[in-house]
Amino acid sequence: MSADKVLRRAMLTAPKEINFDEITLEAPAADEVLVKISACAICTWEKRAYTGADQRFYPLLGGHEISGVVEAIGESAGYGLEVGDRVSVSGLTRCGKCYSCRRGRDNRCDNTWQAGGMKKGDPIGPGGLATYKMAKAYQVFKVADDADLVEVSLTEPLACVIRSIKKSQVEVGDYVAIAGGGVMGILHLILAKRRGATVILFEPDEGRRKFALEIGADHVIDPTEVDIAESVMEITDKRGAQAFFDAVGKVPILESGINALGKGGRLHVYARVYPKGEPISIDPNLFHDKEIVLSGTMSQNREDYLQAAEMISRKAIDLSPIISATFPLDQLTEAFEASTKLENYRIVVTM
Ligand SMILES: [Zn+2]
Ligand SMILES: [Zn+2]
């Protein structure tokens, strides 16, 4: 490649403050692939950094839901890849060598930051809100030539929910309860329906409840009006749900979720719970008497990511209903503002 490509990137530097800078790119190292970014969706992490709810990472090179086109390939990075291929890029870096990676939990790699090749003092982050992404070859997943690159940018959230659904072992004929009708709740709804479950979704916002019904929820309920556990018991003929997903991250929801479970039911902590460290109370006899299971997931491993990329690539799933709007990179502030609005699902930045 010509040596003078300039990467323009956005950095979150303080609440509601975005700076852009430019760096000159070198040719990819042997194990790297340079991707010209087409689209990057805004997720909760970046949103919290933008609003100031999470101020730990300034200056943050946000943007981990990335799609694009291969621009250049390092000499040992090209397994099945060619310049011009459409790709999904996983923002998560994994060392592949640590105990977690070797035990199949590369989503929880022990060296994830170091594996990203970041040096002390560098701004951190996956850097998808930019014109290019220099990725390690293992982060790059080829998709079909006619794949919609805006939809492909949603590979990462889909992969996270694939992991969640797999771990919770949702089966045909299950009752599945989901707390939260945002992007993550809706993705759980779509995949649980695909697995043959009947879905009960709890969401306080009327517009979001209506949307969940359109997407295929069997029951939508306002949790501020009724008791979550009682309504699940009523719908399930007092048997309880086989799985309950918390896509909100609140202790009272988790405690209701426990009481909404039937025998062998699984309570899945999908969303991070704030404030951190707050305990949930649970009668331990429920593990014994009802054989319930508590579980949770974070991020996705490379198998989950590949499965998500293939689903989108083959159009086995339609994610267009949850893409509320696209904004060009120059209107990043407008994009972030839109992402904080309750009526919007994913906001995608296009380059
Ligand atoms: Zn995400
Ligand atoms: Zn590792």
Image (spheres, grey):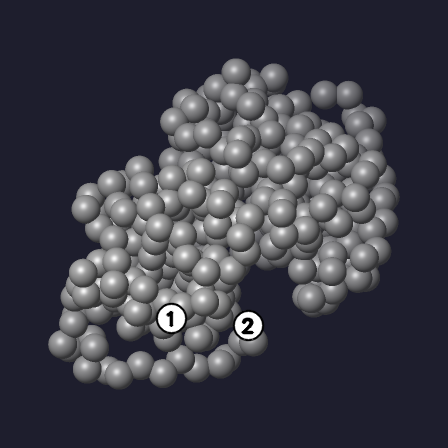
Give the mark count.
2
Mark 2 or mark 1, whichever is nearer to me = 1
Kindly identify which residue carries mark 2.
274
Kindly identify which residue carries mark 1.
227
Depth check: 282 or 39 in front?
Answer: 282
Depth check: 1 or 254 in front?
Answer: 254
Residue type, numbered disc 2: Tyr
Q: Quadrant of residue 303?
A: top left
Residue 32: x and y in percent read 60, 34
Q: Which residue appears at 20% of the width and 44% of the height?
A: 172
Residue 110: x and y in percent read 48, 61
Q: Which residue appears at 45% of the width and 67% of the height?
A: 225
Q: How many other residues sit within 10 Å of disc 2, few (<14), some (14-19) or many (≥20)?
A: few
Look at the image and tell me whether residue 146 can be seen.
yes
> Is 88 located above or below residue 258 in the figure?
above
Disc 2 is placed on an element classified as: loop
Q: CA distance from mark 2 to mark 1?
A: 21 Å
Residue type, numbered disc 1: Asp
Compared across the picture, whether 22 is left or right of 102 comes to right
Disc 1 is placed on an element classified as: loop
Look at the image and tell me whether residue 122 can be seen.
no
Q: Which residue appears at 63% of the width and 52% of the height?
A: 342
Compared across the picture, whether 167 is left or right of 161 comes to left
Q: Which residue appears at 51% of the width and 60% of the height?
A: 204
Q: Quadrant of residue 232?
A: bottom left
Q: How many other residues sit within 10 Å of disc 1, few (<14), some (14-19) or many (≥20)?
A: few
Residue at disc 2, CB closer than 8 Å to ligand 1? no
Q: Which mark is residue 250?
A: none
Compared across the picture, whether 173 is left or right of 49 comes to left
Depth check: 183 or 328 in front?
Answer: 183
Residue 348: x and y in percent read 65, 37
